[in-house]
């Protein structure tokens, strides 16, 4: 509010666009990965009755990126899911910047706490 | 069942769940997990993981529209997200340690509770009043567009609202739902924010809350790409269609029917959990 370029309304508008673009990109990646997955694994019979857990390479950022690069359908879907997960995180990260420009120190701290929880969850949450 | 057939069926079911969820405002997650677990025999952990993904997608998609309308209170959302993300992280850790049957029973109880909540009418806007000292310090008071220009409002009951939000986050992480009903309850009833501000801010918070637990689910291998793909795309398409139809549909009867469906699904989940089928 104090800096004319960073009004609450303008921040709202940028966040709205950011969320929409994030969802569209991740849905497109999931869709193309889904197409590849059905072509590559079409003859298998799915069974989700018993829980096995995903293989290690589909659980972390580096493994997923590697699988997606080799155009593995499952890896590409997982990359799309990662991009989807990254969308709210990017929204929070952008809010940190916006609050810095608004010189709203309280909310810089508030937003950094939320960002830290999100990154902790994505980075080492399972271990 | 072949992979293509399974994918199409799950996608169609998710489309229906997303459509009804957005049309009635009750969210798709509530019917999605019972649909996958009871209908398709999917293990609860996979079902919850896939549901969380769809929750992030629909929340982010819908929030994009609401934020621009100017109802969402970003400061209230951001402050309360400390509570929901910490709760969600705790819920996600619990999900790996608690037996599936317990989660099914808890899920049933939450479904019955949200069916009960949706049968009540929203409280009229509280309007002016004194605000909480916390609300002043955290600048939670705001204004929203109305027919007679922007109307200002105050936030009250901040500590109680914050506590209830932590519970909402924990349930979201444990059950893979958005728990929008409890978030709205915390803002609308406890903090006395205007109803429209509560619902849009809740929607805005749901994506961040779900992302906090989805990271843990991913690391633990609960997110299966083959299942999450049709669920995410189906729910996303369904909820976008629902939002289009919403403007001209008469949703009162639909809400009642959907509440009854949720009630029955809740009873079925409790029964299945108690008899060890899930």
Image (cartoon, coloured by chain):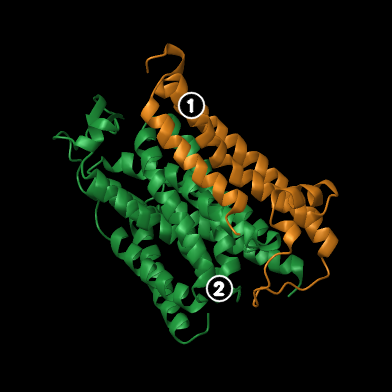
Chain colours: A orange, B green
- Callout 2 and callout 1 share a chain: no
Circle 1 sits on which residue?
A13
Which sits in the foreground, A77 or B220?
A: B220
Given contact means CB atoms under 8 Å apart, are the residues at marks 2 and 1 in contact?
Answer: no
What residue do we see at 29% from left, 34% from top? B140
Circle 2 sits on which residue?
B37
- Please indicate, yes or no, whether residue B51 appears anywhere in the rendered image: yes
What residue do we see at 65% from left, 48% from top? A82
Subunit ID for the residue under disc 2: B
Residue A87 in the image: x percent, y percent? Answer: 58, 40
What residue do we see at 43% from left, 30% from top? A108
Residue B176 in the image: x percent, y percent? Answer: 50, 61
- Distance (Cα) linking label 2 and label 1: 39 Å
Dot 2 alpha-carbon crowd within 10 angstroms: few under 14, some 14 to 19, many 20 or more: many
Mark 1, secondary structure of its residue: helix
Q: Residue furthest top?
A: A4
Q: Give the vertical position of B273 relative to B231 (above or below).
A: below
**In the figure, is residue B102 to the left or right of A74?**
left
Q: Residue furthest left?
A: B129
């Amino acid at each position: 509010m104090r800096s004319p370029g960073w009004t609450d309304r303008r921040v709202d508008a940028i966040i709205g666009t950011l969320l929409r673009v994030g969802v569209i990109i991740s849905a497109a990646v999931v869709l193309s990965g889904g197409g590849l997955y059905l072509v590559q694994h079409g003859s298998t019979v799915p069974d989700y009755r018993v829980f096995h857990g995903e293989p290690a390479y589909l659980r972390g950022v580096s493994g997923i990126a590697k699988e997606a690069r080799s155009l593995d359908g499952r890896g590409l879907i997982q990359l799309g899911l990662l991009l989807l997960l990254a969308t709210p995180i990017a929204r929070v990260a952008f809010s940190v910047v916006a609050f810095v420009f608004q010189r709203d120190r309280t909310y810089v701290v508030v937003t950094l706490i939320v960002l830290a929880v999100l990154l902790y969850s994505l980075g080492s949450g399972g271990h | 069942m072949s992979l293509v057939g399974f994918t199409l069926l799950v996608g169609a079911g998710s489309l229906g769940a997303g459509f009804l969820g957005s049309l009635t405002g009750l969210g798709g997650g509530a019917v999605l997990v019972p649909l996958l677990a009871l209908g398709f025999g999917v293990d609860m952990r996979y079902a919850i993981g896939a549901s969380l993904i769809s929750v992030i997608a629909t929340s982010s998609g819908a929030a994009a529209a609401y934020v621009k309308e100017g109802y969402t209170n970003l400061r209230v959302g951001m402050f309360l997200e400390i509570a929901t993300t910490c709760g969600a992280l705790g819920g996600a850790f619990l999900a790996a340690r608690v037996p599936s049957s317990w989660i099914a029973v808890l899920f049933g109880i939450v479904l019955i509770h949200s069916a009960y909540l949706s049968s009540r009418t929203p409280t009229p806007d509280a309007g002016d009043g004194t605000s909480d000292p916390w609300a002043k310090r955290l600048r939670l008071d705001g204004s929203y567009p109305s027919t007679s220009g922007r109307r200002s409002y105050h936030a009250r009951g901040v500590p109680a609202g914050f506590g209830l939000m932590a519970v909402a986050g924990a349930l979201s992480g444990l059950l893979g739902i958005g728990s929008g009903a409890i978030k709205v309850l915390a803002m609308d009833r406890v903090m006395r924010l205007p109803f429209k501000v509560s619902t849009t801010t809740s929607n805005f918070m749901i994506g961040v809350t779900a992302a906090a637990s989805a990271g843990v689910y991913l690391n633990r291998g609960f997110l299966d790409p083959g299942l999450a793909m049709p669920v995410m795309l189906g729910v996303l398409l369904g909820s976008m269609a629902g939002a289009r139809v919403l403007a001209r549909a008469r949703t009162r009867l639909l809400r009642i029917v959907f509440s009854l469906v949720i009630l029955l699904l809740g009873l079925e989940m409790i029964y299945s959990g108690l008899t060890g089928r899930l």
